[in-house]
Image (cartoon, helix red, strand yellow):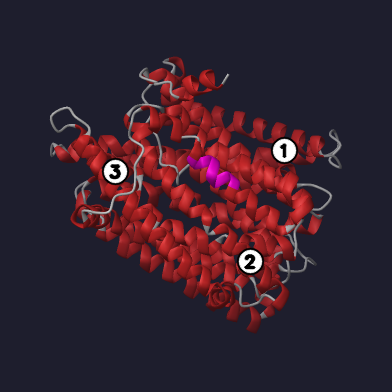
Amino acid sequence: MTNRVLKFLNREFKGINEAALLLGGFAFLSQILGLIRDRMLAQIVGVGETLDVYYAAFRIPDFLYISIASLASVTVLMPFLIEKIGYGGNNIEAKKFLNNIFTAYVVFMVGISLIIFLLMPYLANIIAPGFNDVQIKMLINISRIMLLSPIFIGLSNLIGTVTQIFKNFLVFSLSPVFYNLGIILGIIFLYRFLGIYGLGIGVIVGAFLHFIIQVPVVLKHGFFPRFISNIDWKEVLKVVKTSLPRTLTLSSNSLAFLVLIAIASSFEKGAISLFTFSYNLQSVPVGIIGISYSVAAFPILVKSFSIKDMDNFIKHIIIASKQIIFWSLPVMFLFIVLRAQIVRVVLGTNSFSWADTRLTSASVAIFVISLITQSLVLLFVRGYYATGNTKKPLFINMFSSLIIIIFAYFLMWLFSSNPYLLEVLENLLRVENVSGTIMFILPISYVLGSIINLILIWISFKKDFLKDYNFKVISKTFFDSLLGSIVIGVVSYLSLGIFDDIFDVTTGYGIFLQGFVSGSIGILYGIFVLYLIKNREIRDLFVAIKNKFWKNRIVAPEQIDL
């Protein structure tokens, strides 16, 4: 039995079709499990102090992973490793390189983790200044437990380079799936006996599974790294120098999010949980649209720039931009109109009250306003990375992250000084007479920062690469999609009222049918309108389906994207 499992995990996927279906299927499964994970948390733990502490405890380990472990990412290591393997057809240089990076990573990561472990009592008050003494004590302990998580996931990311090079896409795709499974197991089984510490152990189990699932494949190829005493620091510094700008870019985002969580800790209990739930929900379309198109475009952009074919470079930037705009607008309208149904279906349990639903739904509606901006920023950042320019995205993203923080404190002062402004916002989002609406400053700040981020990176990208380009084609796509999206939104909204009397909306199944059928009718009307105005993207979609698009080559995203 064990041999059969190992043989299955070691399977190489050389065919494009197999790899495409595998990677796409498991990426989708990972997102589904992420939603199930959130539902389990809402149902079993419930919105309140415990869940707030749990989510706050993620911030330091998450920041540690992004700022340190991501220095040894697949994107950075793979070119180095491929180059080493190419030396004379032997793997000696490649193994030396892996041993160098592995040893340096473990020494540095464990050392930093120990320091943070000791400093956690001081850091806890920075992470959640609004917590009481009991919550702070829990936060310190659970954060210390979770410090193992970035170590394991970082190691998994490191050896994931080997699984990708040898086309063992199965285990690479399974890693994030097993990570979420570990967390879900902690929620279902360990929380009952160990409380919040069971949740933390579940995260460690998930991170360990994320790593260990790839080990048999790496051992098979003889590439599992080992500790060495004579580290080639020049080689390590070369990798760090290559990955540092990207890591700093990710770190600035994480730091901004950490500050938002710190602000939320001073709000009513449950604010951190509801904010995190709404952020996770809006991240699903960002992952499906933004990450998909930016990742798919990246290899073509790299190749085009390397051979100085700027026409092709610009062409694929425009194509990806148009597709992102075309898909983002209708999804944005659907999320705004069906926000209550989406939240109730994903998170709705007896422990998740109607007030929780209304606050989360309103936060999701605010977040998805930045769906286009977040997705386009991902594309333009990768466009810059394809040219080797990592500094501009870094500076722009750091400034935008700072703007998010400034907006958060400014809006907190503004709404506190002018309560009537908050009442206007409550009426607009239809959450009158619901306590805790001050939390809306968090998604609003994030959205404003995202918009500024896009404006700045667009101005810079246009100046560098698109000076003489006529943007009429993008404008046409935008207005076509906007018209279709308005139709989708209006029809879906009207359908909700009709099906409210047909389905039993007091049950989860009835709410799902109400939202699903209403959204489906809206989408059909939207497609019909786009077909009538002879929209190019909808015609291309029909052609892609006719030509079986799933047989085309797929580019694997990084674990952090999955």
Picture quadrant where residue 521 is located: top right
Whichever of labels 3 and 1 marks the residue nearer the N terminus, that label is 3
What residue is shown at x 40% (from left), y 54% (from top)?
69
Q: Which residue is mark 2?
A: 141
Task: Name the kind of residue labelled 3 in the image.
Answer: Leu
Q: Main secondary structure of the magenta part?
A: helix
Q: Which residue is mark 3?
A: 98
Whichever of labels 2 and 1 marks the residue nearer the N terminus, that label is 2
Q: Which residues are magenta?
A: 205-211
Q: Which residue is mark 1?
A: 515
Of the pair 406 and 257, the residue shown nearer to us? 257
Q: Position of residue 350 (x, y in %)?
A: 84, 49
Of the pair 92 and 417, the residue shown nearer to us? 92
Does residue 519 lie above or below 19 as drawn? below
Q: CA distance from mark 2 to mark 3?
A: 33 Å
Q: Is residue 354 left or right of residue 179?
A: right
Q: Position of residue 178 (x, y in %)?
A: 57, 38
Mark 2 in CB contact with mark 1 (< 8 angstroms): no
Picture quadrant where residue 223 is located: top left
Q: Is residue 210 magenta?
A: yes
SS state under label 1: helix
Does residue 440 lie above or below 318 as drawn? below
Q: Is residue 92 magenta?
A: no
